[in-house]
Amino acid sequence: MSPATSELPQLKRYLRVAQVRERYGSASDEWIRRKTREAGFPQPFYIDGADRFWSVEELDAWDLATLTREPTRPRKVVRP
């Protein structure tokens, strides 16, 4: 007898660096490196030495935290 589908563990999904660049609007490798050095941005997992992967779950959490926090610098006010 096989276990019910709801009892199976949820598999994590990962994105390659090219997919992370696409997710953030064709971001550059430098943007990804800079964000990775900042506190809070998810750290990549390295598989087979050089291949970098990010957890979709961790990126979603970072996106949500970024959207809900106060800006660190005042926004520029544009006057007509």
Image: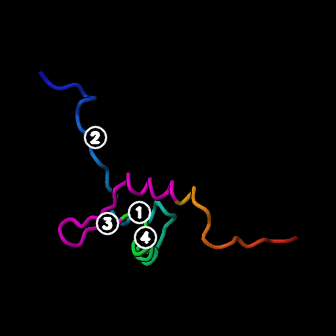
Residue at x 44% of width, y 54% of height? 61
Q: Residue 44 has which mark?
A: 3
The answer to whether residue 73 is left or right of residue 79 is left
Q: Amino acid at mark 2?
A: Gln
Q: Residue 39 has which mark?
A: 4
Residue underneath mark 1: 20
Residue at x 43% of width, y 70% of height? 39
Nearer to us of marks 2 and 4 is 4
- First along the sequence among labels 1 and 3: 1
Q: Residue 7's image quarter? A: top left
What distance separates the C-alpha of mark 3 from that of mark 4? 13 Å
What distance separates the C-alpha of mark 1 from that of mark 2? 21 Å
- First along the sequence among labels 3 and 4: 4
Q: Residue 10 has which mark?
A: 2
SS at mark 3?
A: loop
Q: Is residue 12 shown above or below 34?
A: above
Q: Residue 48 has which mark?
A: none
Q: Amino acid at mark 1?
A: Val
What distance separates the C-alpha of mark 1 from that of mark 4? 18 Å
Residue 34 or residue 28, whichever sits in front: 34
Residue 27 or residue 74, whichever sits in front: 74
Q: Amino acid at mark 3?
A: Pro
What distance separates the C-alpha of mark 2 from that of mark 4? 27 Å
Residue at x 42% of width, y 57% of height? 59
Residue 65 or residue 28, whichever sits in front: 65
The answer to whether residue 47 is left or right of residue 22 is left
